[in-house]
Image (cartoon, rainbow, N blue to C red):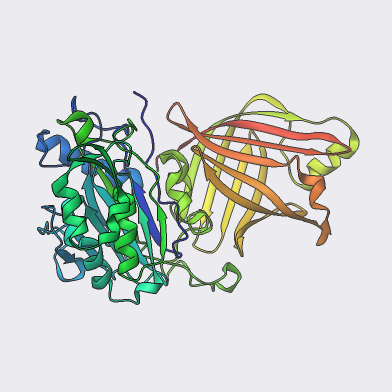
Amino acid sequence: MAAEFALHADWPAPAGVRTAITLRTMAGLSKPPFDAFNLGGRCGDDPAVVEANRAALVAALGLPAQPMWLRQVHGNVVADADALARDAEPEADAAVTHAHGTVLAVLTADCLPVLLCAGDGSAIGVAHAGWRGLAAGVIEAAVAKLGVAPASVLAWLGPAIGPASYEVGDEVRAAFLAHDAGAAAAFEETRPGHWLCDLYALARRRLASAGVRQVFGGNFDTFSDARFYSFRRDRETGRFASLIWIEPATVRADADEIGPNAAADGLQPVFARLLGDAFHRLPPRVRALHAATGVRRYRGSAEVRRGAGWLSRLCGWATRLPGAADTTPIDVEIDASAHEETWTRRFGTQRMRSHLRPHGTLLRERLGLATFEFALSAADGVLRWEPRRVRALGLPLPARWFRGVRAAESQRDGRYRFEVEAALPWLGELVRYEGWLEAVDE
């Protein structure tokens, strides 16, 4: 089974609020039937393996701290993480925090994980909502514990057993109807005394009754989706985690307003700030290259192809593009602060230097006599750069000229990989270079 990367909540959370949902198929040490990335410590797996998986989780996702794990009991108690030690494991089925850098988590394998955040990013919460906890009001309790106006709260319903897969008895339906007669709409009779139960619909009703109107997610089925652990499907199985945290350095100002003390003030590195939650979807090698400040050095190999013609050569000279070569060594030095990065690339003996900094939501790169502004995106393990605006000698150029300019970063065979291509409509290909890099040990 191929290893995969964690998922992230698809919701319009405010800047600085981060999420991750682990998959059983992530690279871990657990053996069958818990293979491979079990994070549950009370489901029968080797405790030492679970601890190793939890340590790997922190490293793989770049978490600011070890998650605060809960001793879940299918109740409605909400832990206040701000009043507990970081290594506490309280008996509770929900948790909240107002602190930056505190990672909240719940473990599930069919039960419903619910992520919560205040609209201004000042508070976050998480709830473990199996049918018992849901009927007991764990969601309402977590919303109340956030301490903000419910109308400002965003909720995301994570991976749980779907309504087509979850058959329950009369006692489950009765538990919900005793509180809300309208909950009958979430049940469909299959045979006498048995019902298909829609946990997502029940959770939406509970959120609405608590005053929460901004609800997202709720389109999973852990029973039929092999990426997730499912107790109903496998019985003896592991647990996956749903996590939420507020980044220690949440940035809200436009990059052009960042002063010279940005790095000392603890702002996020440039790429992490521009990509937001998508940054954590990148593979480890790509994320590591962009995650730190200071001077870092990389070494590798590249293949360079150049366009022909004098005008193509002139454009290449103006932007300091490397010369053609079947194989050439490449050295890269990245000098990064929280507000700007300088990349010095050496293809053999030829040097190409560029300066990068945020400009609103775009990445501005000054390369020789040209200045590009790129939109960054992260999907399917690839970081892509797409040009949006271009200037030469300070004069704006039509964006349509540069639709053939693109760059991509990825990870393959354990290495950081890059691909850059530049072509113009009337000139054809200017340059294409691709290759790999590895960090140089200092």
Residue 314: quarter of image = top right
Q: Residue furthest front?
A: 192
Q: Quadrant of the N terminus?
A: top left
Image coordinates for residue 90, horizontal then vertical, percent: 11, 59
Q: Nearer the viewer, residue 113 or 426?
A: 113
Q: Can the viewer see residue 7 in this picture?
A: yes
Q: Between 442 and 174, which is closer to the camera in this rendering?
A: 174
Tell me: 266 left or right of 259: left
Q: Position of residue 64 (x, y in %)?
A: 31, 57
The answer to whether residue 4 is left or right of residue 126 is right
Quadrant in the picture for the C terminus = top left
Q: Quadrant of residue 231?
A: top left
Q: Is residue 261 above or below residue 386?
A: below
Give whichever of 299, 68 is nearer the camera.
Answer: 68
Please name the residue shown 33% across and 51% down the image.
Answer: 200
Pick the residue in front: 170 or 117.
Answer: 170
Is 97 left or right of 427, judged from the image as shown? left
Number of dots carrying numbers = 0
Name the residue at 12% across, 59% down.
88
- The picture places residue 392, in percent across and down from the top left corner, at 81, 55
At 14% from the left and 58% from the top, the residue drawn is 87
Residue 39, percent across and down?
A: 20, 41
At x 53%, y 72%, the residue is: 253
Work out whether 49 lies above or below 214: above
Q: Is residue 393 visible?
A: no
